[in-house]
Image (cartoon, helix red, strand yellow):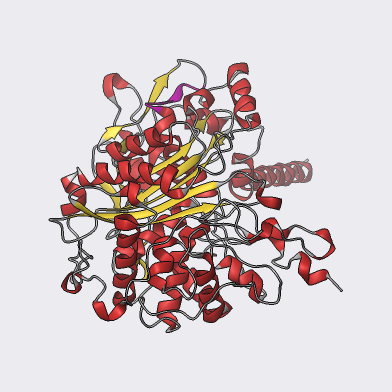
C-alpha cells in the first residue's frame, strides 16, 4: 500500500511539473506569438479601451477619441481630416494605422513605458486616462495655404524650415477623411474599398511616398555638382557646350525652349532652363561626381524617416553617357519625392548645410510632462558656402527675371527653379509641373522657408502646364504664409554669416560678384512649339519622345535612340 501511495505521489508530482512547464511555455516562451495571434482579441480590446492621445498642430488637437460604449470602446476622430491626413495617417479598428498614428503609436496609445506610469491616474470623471500627445512642427496657416493652392488637383507640397529641418507644411492631394476608416462594420469596409479603388488614389501620400521625374528642378543638383567638381569655375563664363547638342553615342539632338543656349553660361542656363548646357555639364562632371552630389542631397537614401517612412528618391548608379545626360536634366530614371526636392532647396538656402527633416517637435505624457523632444540635426554638409551662395544668386535671378517670376513676393528675397517633366512613350504620360524655392524676409538674417511643389494635371493643355505657371503660385502662397509668421523668420537658430543675395546681387550679401559674370548674352525668345523636328519644345523638352530602345523596349529604361539601331 505504501509503495502504491508513493507511486501515486510521484505521478501527481510529475503532473504538477508538467502543468508548471506548460504554464512557462504559454506565458513566457509563446507569449509574444500568442499576443500577436490573429485569433487573440484581447490586445485589440485593450488598445481601444482608453482614449488615444492627440496629435497637435500649433498646440491645437487635430485628432480626438469618441466613446462608442461598445466592446472596442474608443474610436479615433479627426478634425479637418483631409487637410492633415498625410500627416496623421489613419488609425482603424479594422485596418491598422499609418503615418504618425503608426510611427508614434507607443506615445499616443500609452504603451510606451515613458508614458505608461502617467496612465495609472484616472482621467476626467473616472474615465480611463488618455495616451500621450504628439506636437508636430507644422504651421496651420502654411498647411491651409498649400492645401488651398492645390485645390484638389493631384500633387503635393512640402515646406521646410531650412535652418532647423522642421517640416512646416506637408500636403498631398486629393486627400481623404481618415475618420471614415476609424471603426468597424460594413460602412468602414465600403469606405476602404472605395478609397483604394479610386483612380485618383487619395490614400497615396504623394508628399512622402510618390516619386516623380523632377525635370528641370533637378538642374540645381547638376549645377551644384558642376561647381563643386570644378567643371564650372565661374557661373558667368561660357561653358563650351554648343548647338546642336547630341546625346553622346546617339543621333538624338536635345532641344531647348529658348534661344541663347548655344555656348551659354551656367548662370544663363539656370535662369532660362537650357537643357543642352545642363545635360552637357552632367556628362562633363561624370557619373561618379553626379552620383556623389545627388546622394549628398539625399537621393538613394532608403532609411529616411520623418518619422513616417519616405520613399527613396532615385539616381541611377550605372548609366551610359547618353543616359547620364538625360538624368542630369531630371529625366531618364531620375525620380524624386516632393520631400527630397524640398531638401534640395533647403540645403541651398542654408548655405550648403542640409538639416534632417522632421515632423515631430516633442511628445508629452498626459499631464504635460515632456517625454521627448526632437533635436535639430544636420543631415550632412552638401555644398561649400561659396557654391551655395552662387546657387542662391542664380535662383534669385530665376524669380527676378527668369522663368519663376510668378513666385516673387514684395519685401522678400525669393529664389526658385521651375521644372516641367514630361514622361512616357512619346511624352504621352501626365506632365508634372515642379517648382522649388526658398524665401527670406528683407529684415531677417536667415531664410524662413524652403518649399517644393509638384502638380500632376491630366486635364490641362499640355502647352500650359509648366512649373512657373502652375506650381510657382502655390509655392508663393505657402512662402507668404511663412513670412507672415514672425516665429519662422526670427526663431532661435544659427545666424547666417554669409547672408543671402539681395536684390541687385550685392557681393557683401552673398550674391554673385561681377567676376562671376560674363557680359550679357541677350534675352531669349520663345521658340515655336516645334523645334527643329524634335517634337514639342518645352522648358523641359524630353528627347525621348523620338527615342526607341533596342528591341523596342521602354525609352524610360534606356537612353539609346532609334539612330542607335540603324545598320
Tell whether 384 sits left or right of 257: left
In this rendering, does residue 172 appear at all?
yes
Q: In this view, which residue lies farthest toward the left?
A: 443
Residue 440: quarter of image: bottom left
- The magenta region covers 72-80
Residue 560 lies, in percent from the top left, at: 73, 68
Residue 81: x and y, percent? 42, 28
Q: How many marks?
A: 0
Q: Position of residue 450 (x, y in %)?
A: 33, 54
As rendered, which of 388 and 370 lies closer to the eye? Answer: 388
Residue 306 position, x and y percent, is 42, 52
> For the C terminus, which image quadrant?
bottom right
Residue 185 against residue 76 in the figure, above or below: above
Q: Is residue 489 left or right of residue 126?
A: left
Q: Which residue is more in the foreground, 561 or 330?
A: 561
- Is residue 472 depicted above or below 123 in this figure? below
Q: Residue at x 82, y 70 (%)?
A: 565
237 vs 105, nearest the viewer? 237
Quadrant of the snapshot with the N terminus: top right
Residue at 54%, 59% in the rendered image: 313
Whether residue 307 sits left or right of residue 183 in the image: it is left
Q: Residue at x 70, y 77 (%)?
A: 249
Can residue 307 be seen by looking at this rendering? no
Residue 116 location, quadrant: top left
Confirm whether the magenta stretch covers residue 77.
Answer: yes
Indicate whether 50 appears above or below 233: above
Query: Is 394 situated left or right of 549 in this image?
Result: left
Asked whether 551 or 295 is in front, the reply is 551
Q: Residue furthest right?
A: 567
**282 lies above or below 415:** below
Confirm whether the magenta stretch covers residue 485: no
Amino acid at each position: 500500500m505504501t509503495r502504491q501511495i508513493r507511486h501515486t505521489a510521484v505521478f501527481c508530482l510529475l503532473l504538477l511539473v508538467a502543468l508548471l512547464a506548460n504554464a512557462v511555455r504559454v506565458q513566457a516562451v509563446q507569449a509574444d506569438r500568442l499576443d500577436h495571434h490573429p485569433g487573440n482579441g484581447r490586445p485589440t480590446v485593450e488598445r481601444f479601451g482608453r482614449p488615444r492621445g492627440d496629435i497637435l498642430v500649433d498646440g491645437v488637437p487635430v485628432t480626438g477619441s469618441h466613446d462608442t460604449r461598445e466592446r472596442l470602446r474608443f474610436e479615433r476622430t479627426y478634425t479637418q481630416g483631409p487637410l492633415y491626413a498625410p500627416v496623421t495617417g489613419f488609425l482603424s479598428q479594422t485596418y491598422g494605422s499609418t503615418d504618425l498614428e503608426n510611427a508614434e503609436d507607443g506615445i499616443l496609445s500609452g504603451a510606451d513605458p515613458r508614458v505608461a506610469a502617467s496612465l495609472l491616474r484616472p482621467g476626467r470623471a473616472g474615465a480611463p486616462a488618455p495616451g500621450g500627445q504628439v506636437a508636430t512642427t507644422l504651421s496651420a496657416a502654411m498647411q491651409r495655404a498649400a492645401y488651398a493652392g492645390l485645390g484638389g488637383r493631384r500633387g503635393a507640397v512640402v515646406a521646410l524650415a531650412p535652418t532647423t529641418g522642421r517640416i512646416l507644411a506637408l500636403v498631398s492631394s486629393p486627400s481623404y477623411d481618415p475618420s471614415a476608416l476609424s471603426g468597424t462594420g460594413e460602412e468602414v469596409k465600403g469606405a476602404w474599398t472605395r478609397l483604394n479603388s479610386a483612380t485618383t488614389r487619395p490614400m497615396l501620400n504623394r508628399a512622402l511616398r510618390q516619386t516623380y521625374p523632377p525635370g528641370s528642378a533637378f538642374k540645381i543638383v547638376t549645377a551644384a555638382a558642376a561647381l563643386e567638381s570644378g567643371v564650372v569655375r565661374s557661373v558667368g563664363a561660357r561653358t563650351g557646350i554648343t548647338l546642336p547638342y547630341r546625346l553622346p553615342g546617339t543621333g538624338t539632338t536635345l532641344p531647348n525652349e529658348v534661344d541663347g543656349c548655344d555656348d551659354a553660361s551656367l548662370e544663363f542656363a539656370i535662369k532660362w532652363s537650357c537643357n543642352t548646357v545642363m545635360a552637357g555639364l552632367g556628362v562633363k562632371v561624370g557619373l561618379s561626381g553626379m552620383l556623389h552630389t545627388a546622394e549628398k542631397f539625399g537621393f538613394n537614401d532608403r532609411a529616411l524617416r520623418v518619422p513616417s517612412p519616405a520613399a527613396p528618391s532615385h539616381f541611377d548608379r550605372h548609366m551610359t553617357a547618353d543616359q547620364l545626360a538625360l538624368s542630369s536634366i531630371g529625366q531618364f530614371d531620375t525620380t524624386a519625392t516632393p520631400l527630397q526636392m524640398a531638401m534640395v532647396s533647403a540645403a541651398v538656402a542654408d548655405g550648403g548645410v542640409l538639416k534632417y527633416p522632421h515632423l515631430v517637435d516633442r511628445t508629452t505624457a498626459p499631464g504635460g510632462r515632456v517625454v521627448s523632444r526632437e533635436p535639430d540635426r544636420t543631415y550632412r554638409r552638401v555644398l561649400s558656402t561659396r557654391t551655395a551662395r552662387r546657387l542662391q544668386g542664380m535662383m534669385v535671378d530665376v524669380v527676378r527675371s527668369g522663368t519663376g517670376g510668378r513666385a516673387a513676393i514684395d519685401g522678400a528675397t525669393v529664389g526658385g527653379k521651375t521644372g516641367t517633366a514630361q514622361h512616357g512613350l512619346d511624352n504621352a504620360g501626365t506632365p508634372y509641373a515642379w517648382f522649388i524655392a526658398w524665401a527670406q524676409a528683407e529684415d531677417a538674417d536667415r531664410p524662413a522657408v524652403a518649399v517644393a511643389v509638384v502638380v500632376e494635371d491630366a486635364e490641362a493643355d499640355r502647352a500650359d502646364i509648366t512649373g512657373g505657371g502652375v506650381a510657382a503660385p502655390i509655392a508663393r502662397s505657402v512662402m507668404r504664409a511663412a513670412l507672415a509668421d514672425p516665429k519662422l523668420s526670427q526663431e532661435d537658430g544659427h545666424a547666417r554669416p554669409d547672408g543671402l543675395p539681395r536684390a541687385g546681387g550685392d557681393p557683401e550679401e552673398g550674391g554673385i560678384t561681377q567676376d562671376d559674370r560674363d557680359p550679357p548674352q541677350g534675352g531669349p525668345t520663345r521658340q515655336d512649339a516645334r523645334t527643329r523636328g524634335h517634337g514639342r519644345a518645352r522648358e523641359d523638352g524630353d528627347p525621348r519622345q523620338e527615342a526607341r530602345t533596342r528591341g523596342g523596349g521602354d525609352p524610360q529604361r534606356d537612353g539609346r535612340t532609334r539612330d542607335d539601331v540603324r545598320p
